[in-house]
Structures are given as structure tokens and as C-alpha cells.
Amino acid sequence: MQLTIPENLHALQERIAKTSNQYGRAVDTVKLLAVSKMQSEEKVRIAYEAGQRLFGENYVQEALKKQQKLADLAIEWHFIGRIQSNKAKLIAEHFSWVHTVDSLSSAECLNYYRPRNLPPLNCCIQINVGKEKNKGGILPEQAAGFAEQIICLPNLRWRGLMTIPPLTDDVNLQQEQFGKMKVLLTTLKTDYPWLDTLSMGMSGDFEMAIAEGATILRVGTSLFGRRLSTT
Ligand SMILES: *Cc1c(COP(=O)(O)O)cnc(C)c1O
């Protein structure tokens, strides 16, 4: 039996509330970011009508098309894909958040192109917590040095950390990786007390992410179903 998007959304909200309670977290400290990459604009609209407000996209051109068609909705758009420097201007202009900042040059581009009539662009530093080759993000031990540089950019508002840990259904491994992120954020908070964001947890592992302090869960498939190869 296939559930509808509103049914999926309510089921997700219930799982998030239950897990938050279980780990002593206030439910309103855990936000759901609906990852709509390679999902149709109609599906985004249905999720919006069911109450979802935050949506995440990975590909700039795809996102801009969708944003145009959904311009009548009060969506908060988050960019969660790799930042290509030739797309930094469009990202800076068309999103409220960027989760994937992992180089000074892309941070500087986003800062340069952020329109001055918009509030500063909310950013997370992406951490390659599993130290995987070919994965975006800086190493955990580089985070403090990178932080010193990113806070100098006035049109960015650095909010916290993001990670995509190695894919595993071993809950002990999940806990270890997410736990490292929690410790890293806590450490950074001694120098940067305003940090309030841990973007981690996807369809397969968000419950453990909540246990380890996630504040933004990035969920696609569990909400929208399988992704299309083209939109
Ligand atoms: C695609 C994607 C997700 C969502 O993954 P699901 O397994 O479909 O929930 C989350 N974060 C990032 C960075 C992604 O690219």
C-alpha cells in the first residue's frame, strides 16, 4: 500500500515527536527539511498544503525552475548540494540557507553575491565526519580554523554544522558519527555561543540523529517516495 504525501508527513512528524520526547528534546528544536530534489513541483505543493514549509534542493537549475512555479508559496528554500563556484551567485540570490559550505573560496563567493537587501545567508559548515574520499566537507579537526575565517564574512550568518555520514544501518556506527558531530558543535559553541544548528539525519537514520542533537533533519524519500531520474 502506498501512502500519500500528507500521510507520510504526519507519520514523520509523529516519529520525530516520539523520538524527541524519548531523548528529552523539545519537539520544536527539531525541524524537518523536506528534500525535494528530483521530485515534481506538484509534490512540493502537496507537502506545502499539508503544512510543510522548509524545502531542500541540490541542483541549482532544477531548484530555480521549481521556485518560479511555486512563487505563490511562502517556502523557505535550503541549498544542500555541492556548491559550484559558477553557481554561487544564483545560490546566494535564491536561497535562505546553504548547508554545504566547505571551502573558503565558495564562502567568499556566497558572501560577495548575497544581495544586500536580503538578510545574511544562513550557513552550515559541512563536515566529512567519516573522512571519506570523494565526499564533500572539511575534516572535523579543520573546523575551528575554518570558523575563524567564515565569521569574517558579514553577509553570511554561520549557524552550525552539517554532515552526511557514511551510509550504514548499524546503529552503533550511526551513533558514533552523529555523536562526533554533537561534540564538535559543543566545542565550537564555547567560542561561538550563537551556534544553534546541527543539520544531520536522513530517511534511514534520522532517529539516531535526533538522539545526538540534530536540529534539522533532511528527509526526502520517506516523505515523497522514490526520486525520479528527471523532473
Ligand atoms: C538526497 C539528500 C537527502 C535526503 O535523502 P533521503 O535518503 O531521500 O531522505 C538529505 N541530504 C542530502 C545532502 C541529500 O543530498
Image (cartoon, rainbow, N blue to C red):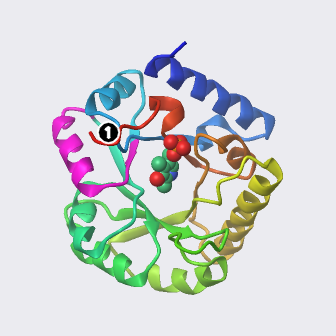
The residue sitting at the top extreme is 1
Residue type pointed to by label 1: Ile
Q: Is residue 72 magenta?
A: yes
Q: Is residue 175 left or right of residue 229?
A: right
Q: Which residue is mark 1?
A: 75
Q: Is residue 155 left or right of residue 164?
A: left
Q: Is residue 139 left or right of residue 48?
A: right
So how many labels did they put on this image? Answer: 1
- Give the answer, above or below, for where 1 lies relative to 104: above
- Whole-percent x, y for residue 4 in the image: 46, 17
- Whole-percent x, y for residue 32 in the image: 52, 39
The residue sitting at the right extreme is 172
- Give the answer, above or below, for where 150 lies relative to 82: below
- At x 21% / y 68%, what residue is drawn? 89
- Give the answer, above or below, for where 103 lies relative to 206: below
* Image quarter (top left, top right, bottom left or bottom right) of the N terminus: top right
Report which quarter residue 203 is drawn in. top right
Q: Residues within 10 Å of mark 1 (few under 14, many from 20)?
A: some
Report which quarter residue 113 is drawn in. bottom left
Q: Secondary structure at mark 1?
A: loop
- Whole-percent x, y for residue 114 in the image: 25, 68
Q: Nearer the viewer, residue 110 or 81?
A: 81
- Give the answer, above or below, for where 130 lies relative to 220: below
Q: Which stretch did the figure color magenta?
A: 55-73
- At x 74% / y 53%, what residue is drawn? 174
Q: Is residue 65 magenta?
A: yes
- At x 40% / y 59%, what residue is drawn? 81
- At x 27% / y 62%, what residue is drawn? 91
Q: Is residue 2 left or right of residue 191?
A: left
Visible residue check, residue 219? no
- Whole-percent x, y for residue 204 in the image: 64, 41
Visible residue check, residue 33? yes
